[in-house]
Image: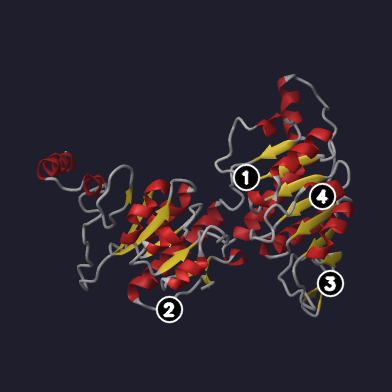
Amino acid sequence: MFLSCIRRKAGTVGVNRYLVHGLTCFTSPLLHRSFSGDMSLKVEKRDADNDKPITRVLFCGPHFPASQNYTREYLEKYPYIQVDDVPLKEVPDHIGNYHLCVVKNMRLDSNVISRANQMKLIMQFGVGLEGVDIDAATKHGIKVARIPGDATGNAASCAEMAIYLMLGLLRKQNEMQISVKQKKLGEPVGETLLGKTVFIMGFGNIGIDLAKRLKPFGVKIIATKRSWASNLQVPVLKACPIQNGVVDDLVDKKGSHGDIYEFAHQADIVVCCLSLNKETVGIVNKSFISSMKKGALLVNIARGSLLDYEAVVHHLESGHLGGLGIDVAWTEPFDPDDPILKFKNIIITPHVAGVTEHSYRSMAKIVGDVALQLHAGTPLTGIELVS
């Protein structure tokens, strides 16, 4: 009742309605908001203890809501850190009010970055920074960073999703649902991972975690990356033999990016774990898929633009591609009316490979700690600076 009185009174004196809306209780230690519509954001909040301005954290857009929600929860005891999420289309108008920006799936070009006149750090709630103009940020004196996937469980979560998609395709998940509805038993006939050759394209943190988890299934693993160290030093599951601290059989055959067509021809399943950049956009094209075995499966848990849409549709229609499992799409959110959904041998999930309680709580802690470090002016930890 008291809060409603505040709101009524605020309306008569012109107080920012978003400020009042954010007061979930009169004694709330943290003022946080999820904005829509017109905003002024001209309130200068200050730390009552040291009279320092509030450090403001901006999450771009409404998607992946657990990122901002978990970060708010982590920071709720720190009233001098403000966490907001702003609609994507309104980010350019309000980015100038913030010190730390978490981009998520927002594209921060040079025009948007030029408006960020208080910004100290742009970072991703995860790994991919392809949407950030890093050169423009550097020009404006803004640091850019990612959160290493191996430190938060993000890589492990993505690796598990890749296996989920593989198993779903091999056991014909969509056809099983049809059998349930039609009261059929013993149909369809699926396949096992046992004995398959899996090509991991891009052997970074996710690829390594995927290989560790695939080995117990009895598969052959072939993998490519830009360059290989003389010995692969990674932590492994107990099932993987180790000599002198080095994994000897995690990967059965190693190659460079120049070998991707040869490796695609050898694989029963291809898994895309590449970073997206100008060299990898559309790398899984008509020529690549044509080089795959007839009936082989394609899985993508990295970025949608690694796959050429027309090439994928063409090879699904021809039957050359045995199945498609993707957690990322060419346009996101994915169009539920997209004609690719007519195929029964595809599984699409809504970009949730890394969205697990474990990884998101871990990343929220890192974002929260970085915000506290920015506020205190201490060195930034837990992130990988790229500029």
Tag 3: residue type? Asp
Question: In the displayed structure, does residue 199 sit left or right of residue 137?
Answer: right
| Quarter location, residue 340 | top right
Q: Residue at x 26, y 57 (%)?
A: 29
Disc 4 to disc 1, how far (Cα)?
Answer: 19 Å
Of residues 75 and 321, the one nearer the viewer is 321
Label 3, label 1: how far apart the Cα atoms are: 37 Å
Disc 3 crowd rating (10 Å Cα; few below 14, some 14-19, many 20+) is some
Residue pointed to by mark 4: 287
Residue matched to label 3: 248
Callout 4 touching callout 2 (CB < 8 Å): no
* Quarter of the image where the N terminus is located: top left
Q: Amino acid at mark 2?
A: Pro
Query: Label 2: how many residues lie within 10 Å, few (<14), some (14-19) or many (20+)?
Result: few
Tell me, for residue 330, which label it has, or none: 1
Between disc 3 and disc 2, the foreground one is 2
Question: Along the line of sight, which residue is nearer the eye, 277 or 9?
Answer: 277
Q: In the rendered structure, which amino acid carries the disc numbered 1? A: Trp
Please tell me whether residue 323 is drawn above or below residue 224 in the rendered image. Answer: above
Residue extending furthest toward the front: 111
